Image: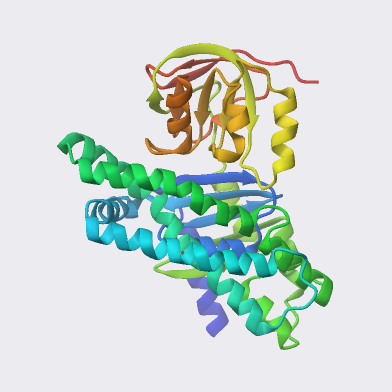
Amino acid sequence: MKNKKTKNMKKMLIEKIKPENYIKYFRTDGLIGCLHSEFLLKGPLGKGMLVINKDLVFYSYVDKKYEKDWAQQGLDLYGNEKKFNKYVQDFKIYIKQAKIIIKKYKKPIDNLTKEQFLEIVEFVEILWKYYGFLETQFQEFAYNTSIKNGDKKMKNNLDYSAKFKFEARDIMIAYYFQGGIIQNIYNYFSRKYKVDGAYLFMKELLGLFDGKKPKSNYKDRKKCYAVINSDGKNSELSYQNALKLYKRFEEKLSVGCIKGTVANKGKVTGRAIIVPMFDNHAQISIIDKRMKKGDILIAESTSPEVIVLCRKAAAIVTNQGGMLSHAVIVSRELKIPCVVNTRDATLVFKDGDLVEVDANKGIVKIIERAQHC
């Protein structure tokens, strides 16, 4: 009776999940394991979040109904000097402590106790609780308000947070990039317990220490898995439901013209270079070798790791980002056009397409499709 009730509740939950009620948060190629998904859903953007991992492509969506809450939280944080200073102070203390954990577990792990695993998890999941407030959802309304009202203190807090985000990102890289702590954890569980550690959730990983084997169908998660936060509670969806949502959320993309937010004005034409969200430095070197001066850099987002690519670019276009994002800061320093928050630029355009970036109007369009063999 209980199982039937649970199935009915999940069926109702799936039926309520509609693409029009969500905004794409970020998309990245590569492995984002189940544990990482759980951390993400525990952050300040986690309430109502949906994540889907299909064939090593990770999609995340945030619920529109919380937009006003995030905007107000951002206004409260960045507009209150005392609250903001405490946030930064606490975050810096966390970063200092996190560096100790990183140093301890940055090499391949040969032995790991349950207590040590919990110690790592405690530190890693806290990162999102701080880092999330540096995202556009919390900053954009506060930024626009500071400009509109001429609030210099709030503007200074926001400008500082944009620079401080780079320091915080170093911790994220140490956690999540290839060879980082999370991958070391996955590799340890895979070797020790003959499982695929990347596709096990926290409860299942803890169970391994107690001799509990995961359900055999967990391997379906390699093909597709999904988790949603509903009313503050995380729910893993079945493989069938995860696949159903993936198909439901697979957007019908534009045929070659998209619109975003003007970040730095200008108008240029060039060949597109598509840059996914990175999880290792080797990928950057590969793209750097084929990128030419004057190409258009089209990315999920930019970060200090890809500054070498930004310097070659005639313009920058990103899926994500607000007026305090790295792409905006860099484009203004380099004096090149920039359009952010296009949502799907990396999917609409292909490497080698001749594209026009009109950053006066926030429009990016295809002039000529590249011929791919």
Q: Is residue 20 visible?
A: no
- Give percent across and percent down for residue 160: 36, 45
Residue found 73% across the figure and 62% down from its top: 220
Q: Quadrant of residue 226?
A: bottom right
Residue found 65% across the figure and 79% down from its top: 116
Residue found 70% across the figure and 28% down from its top: 288
Q: Quadrant of residue 314?
A: top right
Residue found 72% across the figure and 55% down from its top: 223
- 373 on left or right of 43: right
State how many labels appear: 0
Single out the residue that lies furthest toward the left.
Answer: 149
Q: How is the image coloured?
A: rainbow
Viewer-proximal residue among 331 and 66: 331
Looking at the rendered image, the quarter that the N terminus falls into is: bottom right
- 185 on left or right of 309: right
- Give percent across and percent down for residue 277: 61, 42
Viewer-proximal residue among 333 and 364: 333
Single out the residue that lies furthest toward the bottom.
Answer: 210
- Give percent across and percent down for residue 309: 62, 28
Q: Quadrant of residue 266?
A: top left
